[in-house]
Amino acid sequence: MKKKRKKWSTFDIVAYIVLGLLTLITFFPFYNVLIVSVARFDVISKSNLYILPKSFDLSAYKLIMSDLKFWTSFMNSVIVLVAGVAFSMCLSVAGAYALSKKGMPGRNGMLSLILFTMFFNGGLIPFYLIVKELGLVNNILVMIIPAGLNTFYLIIMKNYFGTIPESLEESAKLDGANDMYILLKIILPISAPFIATFGLFYAVERWNEWWYALIFISDSSKAPLQIYLRETLITSNSLLNTMAMDMAAKGNSAKVYTPALQMATIVITCVPIIVVYPFLQKHFNKGIMVGSIKG
């Protein structure tokens, strides 16, 4: 039996055209960054806007990869990513699970205090003084501990855990399981898509972390990749000259187009998250919708 072909209405055609144009508008900046990053030094236009690739040269990437400062920043970002996501997920999952219990003493008061922090804060100067008193200035932990908990994510997680049937936990307790065992062996496995979604959110935040580093870290050896990217974009000419001198000393006289160096840094910075995202994409829609709608 032949399947009936779907009849395309005028609305469908217009919707696809509009969405296609929006996709192109969204994708083009990334495409342009990639094209400029492989531009050759002798292929320079007055504008950095490229429609078609005019050259293919990996000198900018080689130049960045030869910079020891890049690898130091990269490793700092990896440490912040791994430790930060683990720390944030532990706080969020444990806090959300506890707050989802209606019989928890002081639950409403704690929720009120948590919600208060979403709208009000003490300001930058008191925050800096607190961080300084804790000894986190010029410490890589300043990018992990102060930003350890996202209140919005915590509320959504709490709403999700509140939708899990109480009978599931009651039956486990009848078998002698305690709260920690129930959370680790029962709740987390059935919440895998949800947990993976917020793990991705925290991973993106940690990988893109630059604000705490900009304010609290002055030692370049402890700066993350985003600070390296910022310095590259701001001081690309002087950085390019320094790198070129280093390469010339090693017998490499290749020239690099300054915007190519900037764009190559952006591409390298984006690659890790782009690589991770496809593995978690299948959980993304299901995870975020469950917590937001059912809550």
Image (tube, rainbow, N blue to C red):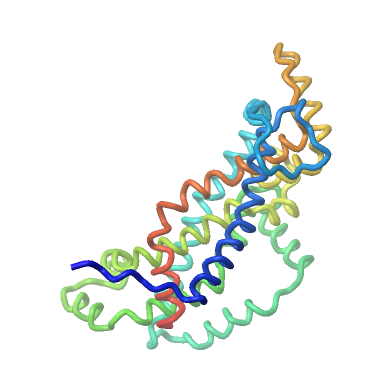
Left or right, 207 with reference to 171: right
Q: Residue at the top extreme?
A: 251
Q: Is residue 182 visible?
A: no
Q: In the rendered view of the protein, which quadrant contains the C terminus?
A: bottom left
Left or right, 134 with reference to 243: left
Q: Residue at the left extreme?
A: 175
Task: Kindly identify the residue that appears in the image at 71 percent across and 63 percent down.
Answer: 130
Q: Is residue 250 above or below residue 52?
A: above
Q: In the rendered view of the protein, which quadrant contains the N terminus?
A: bottom left
Left or right, 241 with reference to 53: right
Residue 68 in which image quadrant: top right
Task: Kindly identify the residue that appears in the image at 66 percent across and 58 percent down.
Answer: 134
Q: Is residue 193 above or below residue 211?
A: below
In the image, residue 185 lies at what x, y percent? 27, 64
Task: Kindly identify the residue that appears in the image at 35 percent across and 81 percent down.
Answer: 163
Q: Is residue 89 visible?
A: yes
In the image, residue 220 lies at what x, y percent? 72, 39
Left or right, 161 with reference to 229: left
In the image, residue 12 lies at what x, y percent? 49, 73
Number of marks in the image?
0
In the image, residue 159 lies at what x, y percent? 43, 80
Give 188 or 273, whichever is nearer the viewer: 273
